[in-house]
Image (cartoon, coloured by chain):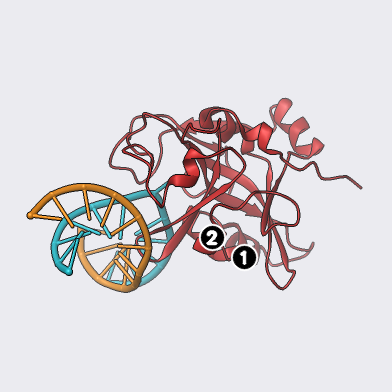
Chain colours: A red, B cyan, C orange
DNA sequence: TGAAGGATTTGT
DNA sequence: CAAATCCTTCAC
């Protein structure tokens, strides 16, 4: 028995490069209109920040990226390549455009005795920013919404078990360069859980 | 008003 | 490596 600790805006009101690694091990929860609740452990993130040429807010404020300029704790969803959506968590202080891209989720374990092939397949269902939005039914209608209980999306802090494993070294994090960019490719602003089967790319 | 291109994914 | 596919941005 455990009580979920919901992530508040104040915890997200820090530079995206600090929040991105801290979000690993936290849980993303999606509640659909019909009441279905989907949960996934965040296992891969990327940070986007001011002065970063890969950031959507690099040039100027536009209709699409305006939520990035606002306060922390809101969602930023955009459409990429005409067919996939990507989910971000807006971070840092009001007026500082920045966000963390959620790139991969580890979905809840299947019941004991499940076919190992099925389990391996499940590991890849949310292994990538476009795939996780597809799995969690996240589209443009969910942009600029607060992450909070009762909303379509919210975030929960790391469970004590995860935090203990992390502190004892049983879980390790990897920091590396971001994926799929044409600019800002050298910034090491991608983090993921080492040897996690649900990470998009090792 | 139109053209170019993208923080992706999948299959050849 | 190229296609799929459409919204956003920027130029004219």
The answer to whether residue A146 is left or right of residue A201 is right
Q: Quadrant of residue A36?
A: bottom right
Q: How many marks?
A: 2
> Of helix, strand and loop, which one carries label 2?
helix
Which residue is label 2 attached to? A133
**Residue A44: percent from left, percent from top:** 55, 43
Residue A136 showing in the rendered view:
yes
Instruction: Decide: is A188 above or below C7.
Output: above
**Residue A107: percent from left, percent from top:** 66, 56
> Of helix, strand and loop, which one carries label 1?
helix
The answer to whether residue C10 is left or right of residue A93 is left
Which residue is label 1 attached to? A117
Viewer-side label of 1, 2: 2
Instruction: Decide: is A28 above or below A165.
Output: below
Chain at numbered mark 1: A
**Residue A132: percent from left, percent from top:** 55, 58
Q: Residue at x 60, y 57 (%)?
A: A123
Q: Residue at x 43, y 62 (%)?
A: A84
**Residue A14: percent from left, percent from top:** 58, 28
Nearer-N-terminus badge (1/2)? 1
From the viewer's side, name the closer residue of A107 and A142.
Answer: A142
Circle 1: is it few (<14), some (14-19), or many (20+) Cα within 10 Å?
Answer: few
Q: Residue at x 60, y 44 (%)?
A: A43
Q: CA distance from mark 1 to mark 2?
A: 23 Å
Chain at numbered mark 2: A
Residue A139 showing in the rendered view:
no
Instruction: Decide: is A102 above or below B1.
Output: above
């Amino acid at each position: 028995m455990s009580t979920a600790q919901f992530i508040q805006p104040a915890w997200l009101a820090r530079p995206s490069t600090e929040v991105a690694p801290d979000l690993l091990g936290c849980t993303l929860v999606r509640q659909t209109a019909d009441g279905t609740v989907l949960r996934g452990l965040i296992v891969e993130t990327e940070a986007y920040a001011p002065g970063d040429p890969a950031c959507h807010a690099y040039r100027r404020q536009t209709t699409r990226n305006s939520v990035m300029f606002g306060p922390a704790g809101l969602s930023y969803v955009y459409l990429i390549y005409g067919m996939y959506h990507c989910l971000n968590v807006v971070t840092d202080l009001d007026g500082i455009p920045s966000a963390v891209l959620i790139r991969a989720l580890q979905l809840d374990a299947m019941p004991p005795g499940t076919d190992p092939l099925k389990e391996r397949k499940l590991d890849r269902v949310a292994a990538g920013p476009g795939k996780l939005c597809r799995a969690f039914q996240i589209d443009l209608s969910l942009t600029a919404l607060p992450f909070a209980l009762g909303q379509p999306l919210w975030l929960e802090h790391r469970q004590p078990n995860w935090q203990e494993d992390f502190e004892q070294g049983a879980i390790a994090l990897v920091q590396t360069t971001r994926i799929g960019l044409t600019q800002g490719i050298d910034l090491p602003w991608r983090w993921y859980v080492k040897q996690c089967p649900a990470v998009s790319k090792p």
